[in-house]
Amino acid sequence: MRITQGTFSYLPDLTDEEILAQIRYALSNGWPISVEYTDDPHPRNSLWEMWGLPMFDLKDPAGVLLEVNACREAHPNAYVKVNAYDARLGRQTTALSFIVQRPTEEPGFRLDRQEGPDRTIRYTTHSYATERPAGARYPSA
């Protein structure tokens, strides 16, 4: 099952040249960039681990790609994404976010049903990856 979060998630994986073009676009708009990773891509897990600090003053797209590749190398079996922030409206807003690395195997989710009082039914998603401990959720490539 392919996780579809962020921009371009329904497209094939981006090449480094395509990632560089998106980084260049974000920087040309004055958007600071950050790199994040996780081994729990649950849709409600919006707080991924940050790789380094946000790159507020960086103007060279190659420098951002260098950080992306360093994160990929350090976490080869994790999801890695790039975020670009727009603070022009007085608040930090995500302007662009896209996944740049996925594990080779994406186990997916199941839908759990829970019946409650007064015939209410609740549903929740359960990530199969979380059945393994953090750091060991995806097999080595």
Image (cartoon, helix red, strand yellow):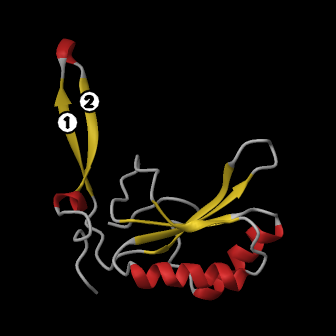
**First in residue order: circle 1 vs circle 2:** 1
Image position of 29 with respect to 90: above or below: below
Residue at point 80%, 43% (across, down): 89
Q: Which mark is residue 44?
A: none
12 or 131, nearer to the observer: 131
Question: Circle 1 sits in a helix, a strand or a loop, which is it?
Answer: strand
Q: Answer with the quarter of the image where residue 66 lies.
A: bottom right
Residue 40: x %, y % from top left: 33, 59
Image position of 115 with respect to 7: above or below: above
Tell whether 19 sits left or right of 112: right
Residue 38: x %, y % from top left: 39, 64
Task: Calculate the distance from the C-alpha at mark 1 to the C-alpha at mark 2.
Answer: 6 Å
Residue type highlighted by circle 2:
Arg
Residue at point 52%, 84% (across, down): 69
Considering every residue shown, the one lying at the far top of the view is 118
Residue at point 45%, 81% (across, down): 72
Return the residue at label 1: 113
Quadrant, the C terminus:
bottom left
| Crowding at mark 1 (Cα within 10 Å: few <14, some 14-19, many 20+) | few
128 or 115, nearer to the observer: 128
Residue at point 40%, 74% (across, down): 102
| Crowding at mark 2 (Cα within 10 Å: few <14, some 14-19, many 20+) | few
Tell whether 68 sits left or right of 44: right
Residue 119: x %, y % from top left: 19, 17
Q: Answer with the quarter of the image where residue 90 lies.
A: top right
Image position of 11 with respect to 87: above or below: below
Question: Circle 2 sits in a helix, a strand or a loop, which is it?
Answer: strand
Residue type highlighted by circle 1:
Arg
Image position of 84 with respect to 28: above or below: above
User: Given contact means CB atoms under 8 Å apart, are the residues at marks 1 and 2 in contact?
Assistant: yes
Return the residue at label 2: 122
Tell whether 66 sits left or right of 79: right
